[in-house]
Image (tube, grey):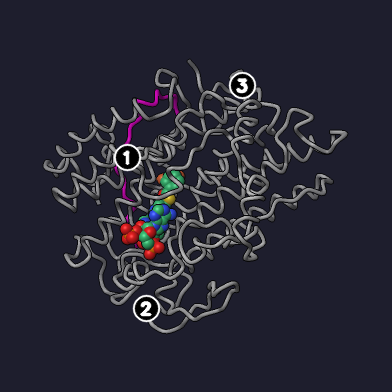
Amino acid sequence: MAAVDLNARIPNNVGLADDPKIRRALEHWQPKYLDWWREMGPSQFAGHEVYLRTAIDVGADGWANFGYVKMPDYRWGVFLSTPGADPRVPAGDCAGSPVWREVPGEHRNALRRIIVTQADTEPASVEQQRLLGASAPSLYDMRNLFQVNVEEGRHLWAMVYLLHKYFGVDGRDEADELLERRSGNPDKPRVLATFNDPCEHWLSFFAFTMFTDRDGKFQLSALRESGFDPLARSCEFMLTEEAFHLFVGETGLERIILRSAELSMQDPNGDARGQGGIGFDTVQRAVNTWFSSCLDLFGSEISSNAANYFAAGLKGRFHERERYEDHVAQAGNYRMPVVEGDRLAVIDVPLRNAMNEVLRDDYITDCERAVKKWNSRLEALGSPLRISLPHRRFNRRQGLYAGHTFDPAGNLIDRDTFEASRDQWLLSRKDSEELKAIMQPVTEPGKVAHWIRPPAKGLGGQDLDFAYVRA
Ligand code: BYC
Ligand code: FE
Ligand code: FE
């Protein structure tokens, strides 16, 4: 592997200095990226100095380097993790054979599609979060938002490098189109539905980093098990950055949940709103809304795409190498309830066709772990309130359950009943207006908005009263 070159125009450890064609192509793309960042990146804060970490190495302690940076000057780079000890295709029909350093011709279209889909989510999330800096509950949180934003930008760089390097003219066109689509734009929307949903306030930001970035964790983990080595190693390094995004979401939601419970206990009517907080029912609706939307990101329960990706060795399962003995998964079924008329019937699906559902299971388990932790904190606080995840069938827009309506417990119900309960189960316009009114910015170092608990500690070796963002 090439050494880390930090002084290059594009910091990298992929040997761009010795690869003039790709270096020039990326240097040509770079100003278009910066134009996009200026137009669609965090509003109003281009001139602020933000205490950010920047990847300068992929080693255990070299990759998180903290310092003040103006976001447009951030050193977005291309980094692959070091090659594994056993570079073999982890899954599929050719499991165990040497990994591919180039794209196999027969998998070119599928791989391009996977990489473009992955890439598209990264700028999309930056666009969705564009206005949130202006209502941050503290400088600590504002800095975390911007950290997430610049790293999603870097994830785009990671994928765009692969497109340029391995997909020729098609790859260059795709890289350009990634800067042309816009989250929520009806004419040129982002690829996956969740990435076109508005994320207008910090309750949604934390739910997004909790649930949507967690889809990122599981999809990247599946791609880390790819036979295409440059993709696997890009995703492996992205996962180290992803851990922080998940921390932001999980602790951010926890801080809101505990504050709302506290304020509910103090209020004569048991409603945190009466004490200037966020209603606990609103928090539950945010969980219902984002969790259900993110379940769609795993694709259909029964998917020939998923079967093909697995068979071809393009995607594996979560921790494929560590957790499974049989990496071919040719035998075996997955039992799955499907809607038949007005009831559910269980059918057997060949395991490979159920790979989306297998990954979704691991995702749900991970979400359940966090909810359990929040609920044990609520119990310790003496609050009777609890958070729950809605059933996987609830409010789905993709897959087997999409054409039907279910309540949060997963019972089949008719559409009228669903619609009558919609505002009780899912975030509504009224919730958004209420939340935006509560979320007045707090920009004094060390101060934190009333509707959220202060964080447990500071970041990057700094105390809570540190000026994480300064004008
Ligand atoms: N919205 O067989 P199906 C992240 C389409 S997040 C709209 O069910 P498949 C991040 C599908 O494309 C991680 N369309 O699904 C997080 C297909 O279209 P065609 C992102 C959808 O292909 C936060 C059709 O429906 N990475 O990194 O097995 C911040 C039927 O397809 C949706 C990836 O997703 C949807 N939700 O699986 C920043 C990894 N779901 O063929 C970043 C790459 C499905 O009919 N992507 N469709 O035109 C994949 O592996 C697969 O494309 C999917 C879908 C798992 C997404
Ligand atoms: Fe990302
Ligand atoms: Fe992320």
Relative image position of residue 369 (x, y in whole percent)? 63, 57
- Mark 3 residue element: loop
Marks 2 and 1 close (CB-CB < 8 Å): no
Q: Which residues are magenta?
A: 67-84
Direction from residue 111 to residue 443 in the image, left or right: right
Marking on residue 254: none
Left or right: 467, with 163 as reference point: right
Give x and y (percent) for residue 310.
35, 70
Q: Is residue 396 above or below residue 384?
A: below
Is 426 in front, or is 97?
Answer: 426
- Residue 223 appears in view: no
Q: Earlier in the sequence, mark 3 or mark 2?
A: 2
- Quick check: which quadrant has ligand 2? top left
- Point out residue 244 in the picture as x, y percentages from the top left corner: 51, 43
Q: Is residue 74 among the parts visible in the rendering?
A: yes
Q: Residues within 10 Å of mark 1 (few under 14, many from 20)?
A: few
Q: Amino acid at mark 2?
A: Val
Q: Which residue is mark 2?
A: 328
Q: Earlier in the sequence, mark 2 or mark 1?
A: 1
Residue 322 is one of the magenta-drawn residues:
no
Asked if marks 3 and 2 touch (Cβ < 8 Å), the reply is: no
> Which residue carries the number 1 mark?
187
The residue located at (30%, 77%) in the rendering is 93
Q: CA distance from mark 2 to mark 1?
A: 41 Å
Looking at the rendered image, the disc whose residue lies closer to the viewer, 2 or 1, is 1
For disc 3, the marked residue is 442
Q: Amino acid at mark 1?
A: Asp
Q: Quadrant of residue 350?
A: bottom left
